[in-house]
Image (cartoon, helix red, strand yellow):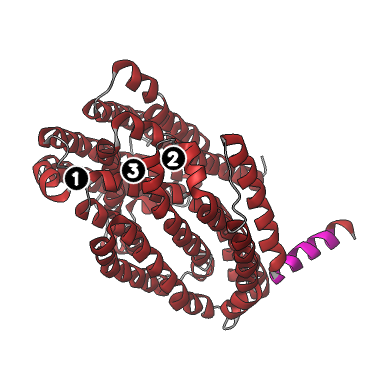
């Protein structure tokens, strides 16, 4: 099989499994909220938040494991060094697993009484759930070690099938079991613990099969030079990852601590659904990274500028209609998903602002392609730190004055400020006029056209009734708005014109 075909197959398998996992996690939310109720479901949302916070401990270790295992598999890395590195990293992961378990298992009473506002739930119930979550988190942390190795050893197809299978067991298989045996929330977490243990066992078995070190290879101490070279990579990746995770989770931490568990539940649902924007746009950006990196290395800056312009415009054309549909018909779409009026009333106001904020972040993330290709993430890290400070300051103020919806306003405003302050800097380092040209040639015409049509639809009092009518109408409007946004963009018009000439001239 040609290398390009192999890479494309790996991308398809990986992207397909990630999309499946994201969609399943979103689609089962109404089932769990209807079964357990908002307050109890808040404990499930809190467990997901803790998993995200736990990733801050990674500090580039998983990236290091993937890189070094890829080097070992390709024959570049020395077997003795790789085996020794795995030995030391496994110790770090195990120590951190014990730390995670101890922190939340023995601190469960503090989390239940001080962190969470769970007055409508029995303290003992919350306590037991936190202790089960502690076990799940510690096992999940160890899984990161083995999953990174499997990824780096290029077993991507196996990993994709494995991820789909585990996601199915965690979120779909449990549904009939829940209804048949009338699960409590403690039994739900006990089931998740069992699946997490099963996942770890399979990952260990697969890793051992892939590595298969010769008995003659012995573990040796790493030299100072090897430590410096290896862990400098960890620091570079870890700082960037740490800042980004902190930025994306700090609002959730505030809401979980300053709001009732039921309010946090609705907030988490809205944020999760708004994450569809990332699912839509991330594959486009990730696919461009290798190509742009190669072009940058060869000094083909004109080609990079062309790809960057098309990518930036394409993301804009995708997210603008999605924002418009959410603001116009978000309530109707949520009603299809869950027919509970309280659910729609609580989620919809938060969803609108997070879709808008995520759309702005999606456009902003395109400039990461340039920073990545240049191999310089210092400005990127500074911009992430700026956004983090904005959210840390504004989110609690928003919650204090307007509850969880106030947090969504504060977060969205912070993202918009970050965009207009830092994107000119991040893009300007590569091309002085690229950001200005994008704003006036592509962004402003597209947003004006979409906004104008959205106002017309808003005041046309278009009443949508029934699932089929809502789905068909909103889909048609989304397609129409996408075409309008594309045709309003000069860059996109030039791209279409060039494509037609090259294929049909």
Q: Which residue is mark 2?
A: 26
Q: Where 175 sits versus 323, above or below?
A: above
SS for dot 3: helix
The mark lying in front, picked from 1 and 3, is 1
- Is residue 474 visible in the rendered image? The answer is yes
Taken as a whole, is the magenta stretch helix, strand or loop? helix
The magenta segment: 490-502
Label 3 crowd bin: few (<14), some (14–19), many (20+), radius 10 Å:
some
Expressed as whole percent of the image width and height from the top left, the position of residue 29 reads: 39, 37
Whether residue 493 is in magenta: the answer is yes
Q: Which residue is mark 3?
A: 144
Q: What is the C-alpha distance between the residues marked 3 and 2?
A: 22 Å
Q: Where 499 sits versus 305, above or below?
A: above
Q: Which residue is mark 1?
A: 100
SS for dot 2: helix
Quarter holding the N terminus? top right
Quarter holding the C terminus? bottom right
Give the mark nearer the N terminus: 1 vs 3.
1
In the drawing, what numbered circle is on residue 280? none
């Amino acid at each position: 099989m040609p290398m390009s075909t192999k890479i494309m197959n790996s991308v398809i398998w990986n992207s397909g499994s990630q999309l499946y996992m994201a969609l399943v996690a979103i689609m089962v939310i109404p089932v769990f909220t209807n079964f357990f109720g908002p307050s109890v479901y808040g404990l499930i949302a809190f467990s997901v938040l803790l998993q995200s916070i736990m990733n801050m401990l990674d500090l580039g270790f998983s990236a290091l494991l993937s890189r070094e295992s890829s080097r070992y598999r390709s024959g570049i890395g020395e077997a003795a060094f790789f085996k020794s590195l795995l030995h030391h990293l496994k110790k770090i992961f195990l120590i951190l697993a014990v730390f995670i378990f101890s922190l939340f298992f023995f601190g469960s009473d503090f989390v239940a009484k001080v962190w969470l506002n769970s007055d409508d739930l029995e303290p003992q119930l919350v306590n037991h759930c936190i202790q089960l979550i502690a076990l799940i988190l510690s096992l999940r942390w160890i899984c990161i070690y083995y999953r990174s190795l499997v990824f780096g050893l290029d077993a991507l197809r196996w990993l994709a099938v494995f991820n789909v299978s585990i996601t199915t067991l965690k979120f779909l298989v449990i549904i009939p079991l829940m209804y048949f045996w009338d699960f409590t929330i403690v039994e739900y977490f006990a089931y998740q613990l069992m699946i997490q243990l099963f996942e770890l066992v399979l990952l260990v078995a697969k890793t051992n099969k892939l590595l298969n070190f010769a008995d003659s290879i012995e573990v040796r101490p790493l030299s100072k030079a090897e430590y410096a070279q290896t862990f400098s990579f960890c620091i570079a990746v870890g700082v960037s990852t740490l800042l980004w995770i902190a930025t994306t989770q700090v609002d959730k931490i505030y809401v979980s601590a300053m709001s009732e568990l039921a309010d946090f539940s609705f907030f988490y649902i809205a944020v999760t659904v708004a994450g569809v924007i990332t699912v839509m746009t991330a594959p486009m950006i990730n696919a461009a990274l290798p190509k742009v990196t190669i072009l940058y290395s060869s000094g083909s800056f004109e080609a990079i500028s062309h790809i960057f312009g098309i990518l930036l415009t394409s993301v804009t054309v995708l997210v603008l209609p999605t924002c418009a549909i959410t603001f116009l018909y978000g309530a109707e779409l949520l009603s299809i998903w869950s027919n509970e009026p309280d659910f729609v009333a609580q989620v919809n106001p938060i969803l609108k602002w997070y879709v808008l904020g995520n759309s702005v972040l999606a456009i902003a993330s395109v400039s990461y392609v340039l920073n990545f290709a240049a191999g310089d993430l210092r400005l990127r890290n500074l911009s992430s730190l700026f956004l983090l400070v904005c959210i840390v300051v504004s989110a609690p103020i928003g919650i204090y004055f307007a509850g969880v919806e106030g947090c969504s306003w504060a977060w969205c405003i912070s993202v918009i400020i970050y965009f207009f302050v830092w994107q000119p800097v991040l893009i300007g380092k590569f091309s002085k006029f690229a950001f200005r040209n994008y704003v006036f040639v592509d962004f402003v015409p597209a947003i004006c056209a979409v906004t104008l049509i959205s106002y017309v639809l808003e005041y046309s009092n278009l009443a949508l009734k029934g699932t089929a009518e809502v789905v068909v109408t909103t889909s048609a409007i989304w397609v129409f708005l996408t075409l309008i946004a594309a045709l309003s963009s000069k860059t996109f018009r030039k791209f279409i014109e060039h494509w037609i000439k090259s294929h049909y001239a």
